[in-house]
Image (cartoon, coloured by chain):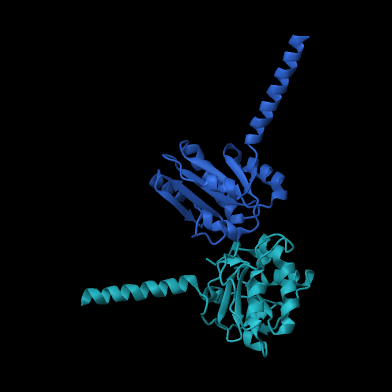
Chain colours: A cyan, B blue
Amino acid sequence: MRKLLIFGFAIIVSLAFTAEKDGYAIGDKATDFNLKNVDGKMVSLKSYEDAKGYIVIFTCNSCPYSVAYEDRIIELQRKYAGKGFPVIAINPNDDKKSPKDSFNKMKERAKEKNFNFAYVYDDSQEITKAYGASNTPHVYVLDAERTVQYIGAIDNNTKNAADADKKYVEEAVDAILAGEKVPTEKTKAIGCTIKWAS
Amino acid sequence: MVKRLFALIFIIVICFNYQLFAQDKQVKVIKVPELEKIIKTEPGKLKVINFWATWCKPCIKELPYFVAAQKKYSEVEFIFISLDYAENEAKVNAFSKKKGLDKSKMYLIDELDYNSWIDKVSPEWSGAIPGTLVVNDYGKEFFEKEFHSGELEQLIEKKK
């Protein structure tokens, strides 16, 4: 009996550990957040009224892959914000580990590139941990109920939008908007590691 | 006349070989099929395959440990695979020389559809660098981490 208890306890601990380490899986309900945008205002998912879903992208200034995707993120916002599917970009990096990713540098980059989407800073890294993001850029597509429907890369070419023939995020969003099943639910988010505070 | 011709051919051959020799120390741009060969198990051989890029700070920080380990363990094969864009080949070469990687096999993987190949390196790999694949007779193990002082040597001692 005792052994069984210990065994059960071990399973619970290992499950809890895995859950914490891995963050969300497809079908999980994602948490809302309240993070500071580059315009100084706080942004939450609930601040988007009548949203049909959300494209949450963990990304930053310093990673070359993130930079390579900036124009494509702008394009996603242009294409889907009007359809009730906004992009929210979250910078997860600790600014002591990665000074190029400080809030001030975020503001500069947003201005330089004319970001048309919210670019918020997760300075406590709590939201990043809750989602389980590990790389930048790392995308979570959520539906209106904040259920995670897609996790991974934006598309299948890290350098050129024109050469990408699998647009994972667009396919996911189109499917959700059409009330269909997302064709590819998970890919690997190629990029830089998130710079955790020590 | 014939002698001169031979001399000329001799010089050309030497130059050509020299060039080949010099090229050995340069980064070679590869695609997935070559990568698959590189990461294969070879009997009795321990391979340490490091994935890096010139823009990746933690990669650059750990490189000296790899260069030092390479001097210490001549029986271990060290391979460096750059994830830089192919257009930056010259930069990778210059950088590798500066860091002392040019004594090893160096490659640049020119495949931008990462989801088509990173699982072949390791299903454990999220696609971020630095990452190091260790291949020996018993199989492969992937380390998605930055190595710190002493850690790589410990790992090699365990694996060899």
Residue B146 visible from this viewpoint: no
Looking at the image, which residue is at 50% across and 56% down?
A: B122
- Seen from the viewer's position, the closer of residues A110 and B88 is B88
Q: Is residue B28 above or below residue A125?
A: above
Q: Is residue B24 left or right of residue B137?
A: right
Q: Quadrant of the C terminus of chain B?
A: top left
Relative placement, left or right, of A18 versus B38 is left
Residue at (64%, 40%) from the top-left corner?
B97
**Residue B44 seen in this snapshot:** yes
Coordinates of residue B118 in the picture (x, y in percent): 56, 57
At which x and y percent is residue A113?
Answer: 78, 69
Residue A145: where, in percent of width, then height? Answer: 58, 86
| Residue at the spot 61% in from the left edge and 77% down from the top edge | A141
Q: Is residue B142 left or right of residue B85?
A: left
Q: Is residue A121 left or right of residue B87?
A: left
Q: Please name whichever residue, A56 or A127, is drawn nearer the observer in this view of the structure.
A: A56
B80 w.r.t. A78: above or below: above
Q: Residue furthest left?
A: A1
Nearest the camera: B38 or B50?
B38
| Vertical position of residue A81 compared to residue B97: above or below | below
Q: Quadrant of residue A180?
A: bottom right
